[in-house]
Image (cartoon, rainbow, N blue to C red):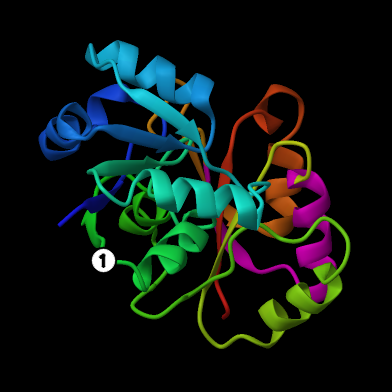
Amino acid sequence: MPTLYVVATPIGNLQDITLRAIDTLKNVSVVLAEDTRMAHKLLSHLGIKKQIIAFHEHSTLSQIAKIVKSISDCDSALITDAGTPSISDPGQRLVSALISRDVAIVPIPGPSALSAILSISDIDCSEFIFLGFPPHKKGRKTLFGRIAESNVPVVLFESPHRIQKTLKELEATCGDHYINVGRELTKIYEEVFRGKLSEAQKHFVGEKQRGEFTIIIDWI
């Protein structure tokens, strides 16, 4: 039976890739990638040459249908730019398209910014809500309203371009809550901030606005 392997790849430090992920990428016929340039960089680092097909959030239904057809008789791997596919990522669309096909779907777990920040948090996250990236415009106010009403910690992703805007809107909507913020997790300039939302706004200025952010908002 053909198999789609959903492969987690490093979120920064290339040494974080698992032995199983490397073996899988070596043995599949096709690699489906969110960004083919990033995929080429990773595979080149690993000394692997494979056919790479683009699959991302802008892939149309007809493009997905072609991809499904092309991998229906071979083993393939799905990777994202960084971390675990389908977590705040379009991988779920491909998995859904393959469910009704005679294709096995196998997870190859590994790095994730979500699990990385949770593992070093001083906030009790025995229960939490993960909401991914906040919308840029439509639905943003509604999302922050949900966060304000939550009785468990909430985890968000955010880009460097909107980190200040998001921190300010969170404080305005939810109050000056205690938060953890992971920036550039597993990379050279990795940083974890712990403090109030108002303090975070003062902290993340200038060069500290660079990188990808993962935020945990304590509900207390």
Residue 175 painted magenta = yes
Image height of 84 relative to 17, above or below:
below
Left-right relation of 153 to 158: left
Quick one: 60 or 194, which is closer to the camera? 60
- Quadrant in the picture for the C terminus: bottom right
Q: Which residue is located at x 63 percent, y 47 percent? A: 59
Image height of 151 relative to 66, above or below:
below
Residue 141 position by quadrant:
bottom right
Say if residue 135 shows up in the picture: yes
Quick one: 111 or 186, which is closer to the camera? 111
Left-right relation of 163 to 82: right
Q: Which residue is located at x 43 percent, y 52 percent? A: 68
What is the magenta segment's predominant secondary structure?
A: helix
Residue 51, percent from left and from top = 36, 24
Which residue in the structure is indicated by mark 1? 102
Residue 67 painted magenta = no
Label 1: state its secondary structure.
Answer: loop
Q: Which amino acid does label 1 sit on?
A: Asp
Q: Which residue is located at x 51 percent, y 47 percent? A: 66
Left-right relation of 120 to 21: right
Say if residue 10 shows up in the picture: no
Question: What is the span of residues highlighted in magenta in the rendered image?
Answer: 163-182
Residue 20 position by quadrant:
top left
Q: How crowded is mark 1: few (under 14 residues within 10 Å), some or many (20 or more)?
A: few
